[in-house]
Image: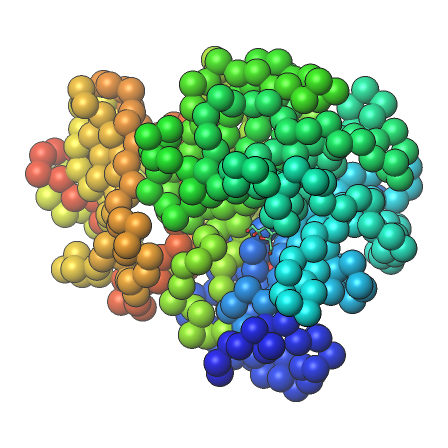
């Protein structure tokens, strides 16, 4: 089918139930579906939205276009969980069905107020000349999951931005509501974070742009997100068109963070000792990460594993993208750590201990043959070793996801997906690398789920997330080295969440 604009933006009611069912049936047969990551029943999934804890449950929404693997008329799909791992689908919650969100219920956040969850989101509206009019809208979700939209928008686009003004994050600090928004400055056409405040959610005051960097942040900032992590403000955002001299990145658009020193939202100021932003994830496919401060005292983050403006192999199967697993954030000695949440361990079954024992092996050592393609692999490699860990490998190693490492003086880990399966996004390179501390053991905690892999390095001091689309012949885990190699670890099969 040709995805004309008219098709992408036609009302949901123009699609028949039979069409949707047939799409869902097609998607259900895909070889690439993850088992313990959230993926769409059909169509396209993008940004996580409204991540919150309400009514004794975790709530998470995502941007959804259910009718194909394209960016069309967006709504919010709702999920709930008791443990941040097992997600139950609740269906479409926020639909583009008013004059203030007619062309998409775009990204936003959620905040518990008294006995309801307040949702703040961008209503994307296009006029007959296809001019964009963004509205910042509100809705209440009650304890019975009933959603009621506010009659009128909370505020419109200010004079000083273009129509690229969206993705509000609602925060409550010092008896004041603040909204951080992604924006493009009208005069300079540069990316900014806009800041608004309100005492009552009705009357909003424009505080201008958040002063958080002296660097130019490209032509647009999407999905700004502020959380407190171990008493430090952490700013996560997506600068589009960022000059690579400011910060090196390979993905089409980076998702970055800055650890702050001081935060004064009333004065629109966020100061930091960090010279430039850093990649939130050092792999290939993370974007639009949303984090929030939960009542249990932790900061949790979840990312879209997919990127704008890139085709993925499952587009042909009428579905695209998934969410990352939830990551708990920590800041230690000025560095950001991301860790799997404890409940991930509940998915483990049938563990297998891996060690070369006294007979250290060399060359190609098959650690696991014909494993399930849904597993966790925890491996410690002592200092002074070098080799390549191949995941999703075939017999002759013609195809694999290749994790090359050295734990010697010039220690590093690189991940190469060049021969990992169906090709995509090659224009943006097939390899990502991180430097590691010299002469120190390397701890890998790898989560593999059919077509997504999340690699937590040294207790989350780096995370590399990626999609890959291997063939059915790629079922081995092989450790390759030209020297004797020592290691110690465990492989677990992981259960599906549904
Ligand atoms: C980021 C984004 C947001 C927007 C949403 C629309 O991926 O472009 O800026 O609100 O996706 O789906």
Instruction: Indicate the position of residue 47 as horizontal and vertical percent values.
Output: 58, 51
Instruction: Indicate the position of residue 427 as horizontal and vertical percent values.
Output: 28, 54
Q: Residue at x 28, y 56 (%)?
A: 426
Q: Residue furthest left?
A: 482
Instruction: Indicate the position of residue 421 as horizontal and vertical percent values.
Output: 28, 62
Q: Residue at x 23, y 18 (%)?
A: 439
Please say if 83 is above or below 129: above
| 38 relative position to 297: left or right | left
Please say if 56 is above or below 1: above
Please say if 188 is above or below 80: above
Q: Quadrant of residue 327?
A: top right
For the question of whether residue 441 can be seen, the reply is yes
| 462 relative position to 62: left or right | left
Instruction: Indicate the position of residue 71 as horizontal and vertical percent values.
Output: 55, 64
Front-lying residue, 219 or 404: 219
| Colour setup of the view | rainbow
Q: Residue at x 51, y 76 (%)?
A: 3
| 397 relative position to 374: left or right | left
Q: Which quadrant holds the C terminus?
A: bottom right
| 1 relative position to 470: left or right | right
Q: Residue at x 71, y 75 (%)?
A: 11
For the question of whether residue 381 can be seen, the reply is no
Q: How many numbered tags mark residues here?
A: 0
Q: Residue furthest front?
A: 187
């Amino acid at each position: 089918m040709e995805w004309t604009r008219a098709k992408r933006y036609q009302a949901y009611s123009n699609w028949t139930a039979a069409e949707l069912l047939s799409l869902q049936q097609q998607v259900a047969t895909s070889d690439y579906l993850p088992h313990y990551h959230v993926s769409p029943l059909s169509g396209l999934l993008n940004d996580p939205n409204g991540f919150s804890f309400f009514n004794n449950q975790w709530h998470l929404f995502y941007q959804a276009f259910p009718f194909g693997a394209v960016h069309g008329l967006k709504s919010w799909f709702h999920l709930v969980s008791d443990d941040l791992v097992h997600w139950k689908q609740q269906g479409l919650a926020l639909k583009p069905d008013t004059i203030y969100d007619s062309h998409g219920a775009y990204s936003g956040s959620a905040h518990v107020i008294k006995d309801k969850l307040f949702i703040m989101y961008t209503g994307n509206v296009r006029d007959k000349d296809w001019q964009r009019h963004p509205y910042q809208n509100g809705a209440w979700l009650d304890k019975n999951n009933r959603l009621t939209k506010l009659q009128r928008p909370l505020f419109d686009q200010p004079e000083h931005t273009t129509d690229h003004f969206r993705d509000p994050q609602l925060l409550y600090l010092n008896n004041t509501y603040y909204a951080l928004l992604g924006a493009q400055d009208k005069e300079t056409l540069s990316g900014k974070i806009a800041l608004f405040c309100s005492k009552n959610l009705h009357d909003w005051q424009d505080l201008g742009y958040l002063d958080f960097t002296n660097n130019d942040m490209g032509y647009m900032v999407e999905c700004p997100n502020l959380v407190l992590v171990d008493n430090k403000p952490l700013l996560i955002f997506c600068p589009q068109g960022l000059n690579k001299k400011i910060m090196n990145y390979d993905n089409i658009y980076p998702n970055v963070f800055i650890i702050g020193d001081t935060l004064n939202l009333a004065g629109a100021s966020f100061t930091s000792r960090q010279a430039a932003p850093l990649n939130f994830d050092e792999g290939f496919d993370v974007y639009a990460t949303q984090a929030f401060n939960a009542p249990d005292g932790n900061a949790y983050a979840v990312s879209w594993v997919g990127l704008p403006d890139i085709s993925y192999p499952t587009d042909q199967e009428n579905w695209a993208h998934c969410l990352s697993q939830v990551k708990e954030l920590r800041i230690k000695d000025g560095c950001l750590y991301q860790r799997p949440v404890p409940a991930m361990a509940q998915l483990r079954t049938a563990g297998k201990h891996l060690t070369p024992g006294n007979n250290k092996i060399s060359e190609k050592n098959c650690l696991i043959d014909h494993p399930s393609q849904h597993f966790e692999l925890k491996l410690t490699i002592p200092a002074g070793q070098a080799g390549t860990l191949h995941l999703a490998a075939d017999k002759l190693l013609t195809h694999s996801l290749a994790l090359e490492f050295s734990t010697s003086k010039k220690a590093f880990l690189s991940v190469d997906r060049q021969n990992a399966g169906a090709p995509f996004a090659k224009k943006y390179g097939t390899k990502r690398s991180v430097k590691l501390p010299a002469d120190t053991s390397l701890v890998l905690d790898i989560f593999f789920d059919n077509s997504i892999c999340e690699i937590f390095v040294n207790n989350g001091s780096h995370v590399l997330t990626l999609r890959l689309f291997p063939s059915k012949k790629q079922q081995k885990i092989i450790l390759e080295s030209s020297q004797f190699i020592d290691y110690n670890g465990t492989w677990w099969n992981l259960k599906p969440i549904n």
